[in-house]
Image: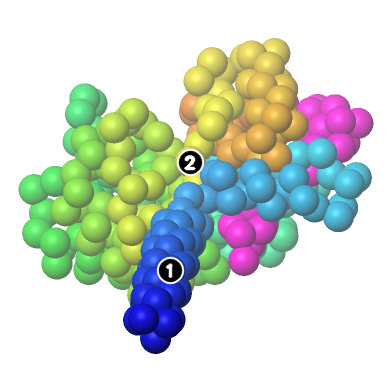
Amino acid sequence: MKKKIFFIIINKKRIILTLVLFVVLITVLIGVRAQMKKNTRVWNYHEVIVKKLEGKSDREVQGKVAIIIDDFGNAGDGTKEMVAIQSVLTCAVIPFLPYTNEDAVLAHNRGHEVIIHIPMEPHFGNPKWLGEKGITTNLSTEQVKSIIREAIEKVPYAVGVNNHMGSKATEDRRIITAIVEVLKENDMYIVDSKTSMTSVIREIAEEYEVPVLERAVFLDNEKNIDAIKKQLELLGEIALKDGYAVGIGHVGPEGGVVTAKAIEEMIPVFEKKAIKIVPVSELIKEVF
Ligand SMILES: [Zn+2]
C-alpha cells in the first residue's frame, strides 16, 4: 500500500515536471518567433533610423536632412551654383545624357555624393521626357537589368539610385524587382522619389534587403525662393520630429539657381536648430 502511494506521488511529480517542461518549451518557442519577427523588421529603414538617432551619443545633432538634387547630366541651370554649396548634397545624375559623366565627376570633386537618377515611365506625360533608355513597363526583365547595369557604368561614383518621374513604372512589381536585383549585386541603395503613392519600391527593396529611403518633401514644386525656403523649413521640422528627413530639389528649369540660393540661405537656419545636412549614405549607415 505504501509502495503504491509512493508510485502515485512519483507519477504525479513526473506529470507536473512534464507540464512545466511543456510550458517552458512553448514560452521559448513564442520568444524565438517574436525575435524572428523583430529581425525581419530590421529592414524597415524609417523605424530603425528613428530609433538609432534617438539613442545617439552625439546630442548636438537634433536631426539630419539629406538633400537630393535631381536632374544633373544636362549641365542645366544652377549646376555650378549647386555644387558650390558648402554642405554635402546628394546629386542625382541622369544617365545617357551629353553631360552625364562631366556632371557626376564635377559633383564628386566638389565633395557631394553621386547617385543615378533613373528615368522611369509616368502615367501621364510625354514619353519623350524620359530621353534615351528610359525604364518603361513594356521592356523585358533582361532589358531592364541591362539598362540599369549600363547606367551604373555611365555614372561614375554612384552609390545609389532614385527615380526620375516613374509614377507608372514604380507601381510595377516585375520592373522594380529587376532594378532591385541589380542594385543588390552592386551594393547600392535606392531612394523612392514617391511620384506614386502606390509605389512598390520600398516593399521590394526591403524584401531583398537593399537599403531604401523615401522622399519626404519636394523642395521646388513652386519655383520661388520663399516657397522653397518654406519647404526646406518643413524638411527641417520633419527631421527634428523623426530624427531624419529626405528632401528633393532640382537643377535645370524646375529649380536651378533659385533652389541653390534657397538652400544656401537655409544653411545657417539649420545650423541654429542643430539640423545637420548629410548625404543619403550617412542616413543609410546609421542602420548598420
Ligand atoms: Zn527628375
Q: Is residue 148 above or below residue 71?
A: below
Query: Which region of the structure is painted magenta?
Result: 260-288
Q: Quadrant of the C terminus?
A: bottom right
- Count residues near mark 1 (Cα–Cα under 10 Å), then give few for <14, some for 14-19, many for 20+: few
> What is the secondary structure assignment of the residue under circle 1?
helix
Q: Residue at x 23, y 39 (%)?
A: 171
Q: Residue furthest bottom?
A: 3
Question: Does the rendering let one see residue 128?
Answer: no
Q: Earlier in the sequence, mark 2 or mark 1?
A: 1
Tell me: is circle 1 under 8 Å from ligand 1: no
Q: Is residue 37 above or below residue 4?
A: above
Q: Residue 214, which numbered label?
A: 2
Image location of residue 94, percent across then percent down: 41, 51
- Give the side of residue 105 with respect to residue 34, left or right: right
Question: Does the rendering let one see residue 271?
Answer: yes
Image location of residue 117, percent across then percent down: 42, 50
Residue position for label 1: 16
Q: Nearer the viewer, residue 32 or 175?
A: 32
- Count residues near mark 2 (Cα–Cα under 10 Å), then give few for <14, some for 14-19, many for 20+: some
* Cα distance between the residues tagged 2 and 1: 54 Å
